[in-house]
Amino acid sequence: WVKFQRLVHHLRFQILTASLAQLARLDNRVTKIMQRETPRQALLDAPTHEVFNQASPLCGYNAFLGDSALVEGVTAHGGEWGTGRLEQLGAAVGSEEWQARAADANRHPPRLETHDRFGHRIDAAAFHPAYHQLMQLGLEAGAAAFAWQAEHLGRPGAHVIRGALMYLMYQLDPGVCCPITMTFAAVPALQQQRQEHDQNSFVAGMLAKLVSCKYNGRDAPFQNKSGATVGMSMTEKQGGSDVRANTTTALPVREGHEMPGDEFRLCGHKWFTSAPMSDAFLTLAQTKAGVSCFIVPRWKPDESRNVGFTLQRLKDKLGDKSNASSEVEYHGAWGVLLGESGRGVRTIVEMVVHTRLDCVIGSAALMRLSAQLAAHHACGRSAFGRKLLEQPLMRAVLADLALESEAALATWLRLARAFDRAGEEPSEAAFIRLATAVAKYYVCKRAPLVAYEAMECHGGNGYVEEGPMARLFRQSPLNAIWEGSGNIICLDVLRALRNEPDSARALLEELEKGIQPAEEAGLKLGIPNSFKMSVSCLREDLSLQLAELELRARPVIERLAICLQASILLRYGDAVVAQCFLATRLPGPEKTPVSAGHCLGGLATNLPE
């Protein structure tokens, strides 16, 4: 470049002293020089870079049909008659249009509006329009009420289909799945109210709206809406999961009338009230008899606002941004006693079991999407001369992610099958009580690990908010905390072992059904496994005194969950997946079985290609 500049200066001097003929020759020479330098100049004038070697967005697919494990699992557990509805929702979940709406709902979180423009108190949370569109999609698809509708109630596979609808919806937006789950779980709690205790058919009217598969986001009396939702308002500042420490009080409207269905006034506070725009809330308060359960609507049966229900603020949460969580105060809020006074915890047990099922489903869905995004990225990006998918280390990580995802999927499908059969088979009802808690403990704890590894597969692209992995990672701890964090679940399992021995027996029988298939799988793969030995050790562990077992509860429950997943995969899942799960999670007797802190990508390295 310096030489070129010197040449130009030299030519300029010659031009000043040249004849016309010489000028013509010099002009030709300059033109040739400039033509020779054009490629360099073009490079300097060109755009700074070209975008290549970037994976495409994961959209334009059917989230149901594209998930062979889900399709086969739904069929295996009796839900094949719901595939049409699942295909329809799957198309929406995988579409660019609905994914953009989910992004908008999280980019514009709800805001608190305590008063209207005239100064009237309204205690409302205002949402982006996309939130309401997502709520309508999920509720009308049946993610809350499919299994409760009259034409589906009691039909084999109804809970499997409903669970699959929730599984798909959670992959689109976990935030709206919170009120959808609570609406689903509120139904069995409300159904406990006997007809003679349901004054003015208040509870029956609410139930009819909850199972309608309709959505109406207006803040209005539920009697005037096509559908309704229910939220939960249980915990308080000082107690958290220890709801017996609650200080909120409930006084009967009419002295001496403290029977189920009677009216009460509630005074106190709630530290976490999920989905505050729900039409009603299941809540706990102290009566003379102790902790009791109430249903508190936003609007009273006479269609006047329940003015004693006031929102204090909305929570600024780590994730779950599209959904509102709030702090609430009751200043004489009107409510109806649900179940017997002093038996509030017992009243909500059925609701808790159902919400825990959805915790497992939600975490499994998050793992599925995380693993899918990682694999999609690895298919579309190259490094060091090869596609990421062709790199041995990356293949090992993706294989482990896939195993975690399919094991979690198989677990909730088996649980949903038990929910379908619990009414007719006592052993299935007993299985639900313990297996749901064990699965909730383990699967929900795996979700953050899977989400992190999937994010790391993306490199820096996974760490920015523009992509999907950041939102999934922030969402991933929620289900492990909601409806009982790890230690609470452990204590709940210990209580079930003490008070409901049938549940322990049913779970162990479920594990033992996998022993013979596990032995056969080890022979087929040529890699021994420790499934039989692990089941035997668990039987010994569960026979210990509870005081001795409490300190060991976490590792014992973890091994229960891993063996449960193995047994389910062996009997209902893909044969190759089951064999690989055994080889990596329950290796031969000479090796130590996997722990929850294991390194994903380190286990699959010894598997055949």
Image (tube, grey):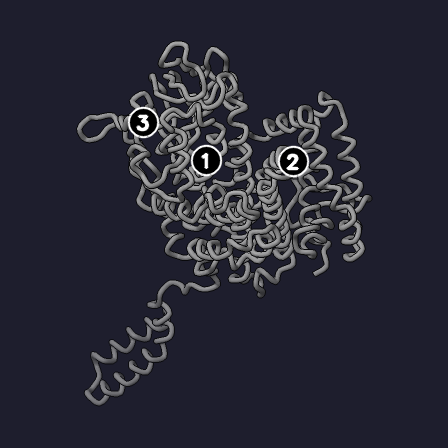
Q: Earlier in the sequence, mark 3 or mark 1?
A: 1
Q: Which mark is residue 596?
A: none
Q: Disc 1 and disc 2: Cα gap in Å?
A: 25 Å
Query: For numbered disc 2, what is the local secondary structure?
Result: helix
Left or right placement of residue 375 versus residue 557 in this view: left
Nearer the observer, 28 or 441:
441
The correct choice, above or below, for 317 with respect to 46 in the image is above
Tag 1 secondary structure: helix
Q: Which residue is mark 3?
A: 301
Say whether marks 1 and 2 touch (CB < 8 Å). Answer: no
Residue 401 location, x and y as percent? 60, 50
Q: Which residue type does callout 3 highlight?
A: Pro
Q: Amino acid at mark 2?
A: Pro
Q: Residue under circle 2?
A: 426
Among the 4 quarters of the image, the one containing residue 123: top left
Residue 593 position by quadrant = top right
- At label 2, counting other C-alpha atoms closer than 10 Å, the crowd grade (few under 14, some 14-19, many 20 or more) is some
Say which residue label 1 marks.
Answer: 182
Determine the CA span between mark 3 and mark 2: 38 Å
